[in-house]
Image (spheres, helix red, strand yellow):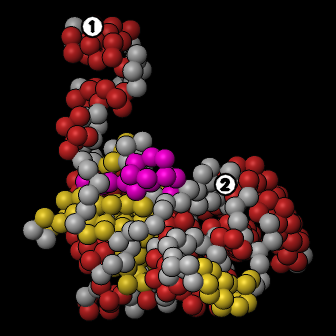
Amino acid sequence: MTDESLSPDMLSTFAQEFDADTAARIVQNAVTETPVTKVAMDRRIVTSIDPSMSVKVDTWATTNQKKSGRCWLFSGLNAFKPAVNEATGLKSFEFSQNYQHFWDKLEKANYFLTSMIELADRDIDDRTVHYLLSDPIGDGGQWNMFVALVKKYGVVPKYAMPETESSSNTHNMNRTLEMLLRRGARDVRKAVADGNDAHAVKTSVMQQVYRVLAIHLGTPPTSFIWQWEDKDGKFHRHGEVTPQEFAQLYVPDLDEYVCLVNDPRETSPMNRLFTVDRLGNVVGARPVTYLNVPVEVIRSATVATLQDGQPVWMGCDTSKQCDRERGIWDGNLYDYEGTYGIDLEMTKAEELEFGEAMMTHAMVFTGVDLVNGEPRRWRVENSWGKDIADKGFFTMNDSWFDQHVFEVAVHRSRLSAELLAVLDEEPIMLPAWDPMGSLA
């Protein structure tokens, strides 16, 4: 049997080779005193980027999710606030993210407990059960989960349900909900095992979840008075409306939008429809599905939508090759390979297969810089506040797009007839823990 331990001779060789490498010792001097991101940053890229775009649709201020994982809700709502500005003459409008957040948490709790009942015959260490218990009610989500919330609960202006301390800083609330739901999972599993009414147990837990959410986030409005003063100073009063009626006024038919992803793994064939086991928030809503396409299809659909004056919801692996303060992404922004003198290259498919990549953040494309019809740079509305980047808008070089953008939501009209036909097929089911089921 081969001895796989680290021997003294091996460690001595490592140390001798490092000490003999002048470049490694110079970098050691730099990195022990300076963050490696500053040492590895390619200055040529930083000085070549500016935020100007040949196509730009944003005329509004950015938002701030603060210490929460609600980027997918912020970006979903941000994608449609231009429609409100155009219809009302408002200069700046913002939907209530807290309203959507409340209902998402409540629905996620019900979705989780329903799964616990349905999986009650499995061992507690079953991989799916264990995966669901690891994060029963996180802040994140996907496009179809946003759609499910809007269709069921509508939307409201921010003043109708403003931010609270806990909507902007979700840690303490989430910790309480996690404890409550794991205890609830224990109780519904026991009820099933004992032949008792697990659904009655679930209802009792859900009442407690509602109570916790109302304490932290406030009580969602069932109606509100919609009136406003437009940018020219003219006053308008629409009257009392429900959240569902407000959505009908300003949000397009979200069933007409398709989630496109780029998953180049050999196990994920292109031009096929996919879903992920146990992925969702609203029980009874349309399942979370996405159409896997080449990245060029995503790029072309996004460009065409922006050229028509509409922003595009997107999901990506945001932390890779990113300067948060400057607000820039580039595929080679940091030369870690040159800094360390090691090989770090992996394809997008390999990063997915080996746990190096997944969708971690959702934002909105609001511009693109085209040269001879081809994109070289993208403008992105983030939800990290206005004090970074270009007043909160980030700049993405196209070199970043292929490797780190995973998902966009576009209107069906952007797809070919061949791709539209795929939407009617039975989706391929991926396991609950697949990286394409990650929540932004």
| Side of 354 where 182 appears, left or right | right
Residue name at image x 33 percent, y 48 percent: 328
Looking at the rendering, which quadrant does residue 116 occupy? bottom right
Residue at horizontal 27 percent and vertical 7 percent from the top: 19
Give the x, y percent position of residue 425: 39, 89
Element type where label 2 sits in the image = helix
Range of the magenta residues? 383-397
Q: Pointer 2: what residue?
A: 168
Picture quarter with the N terminus? top left
97 or 275: nearer the viewer: 97
Return the residue at label 1.
19
Residue occupying the far left of the picture: 372
Mark 2–mark 1 Cα distance, whole angstroms, equals 48 Å
Which sits earlier in the primary sequence, circle 2 or circle 1? 1
Residue type at tag 2: Ser
Q: Is residue 391 magenta?
A: yes
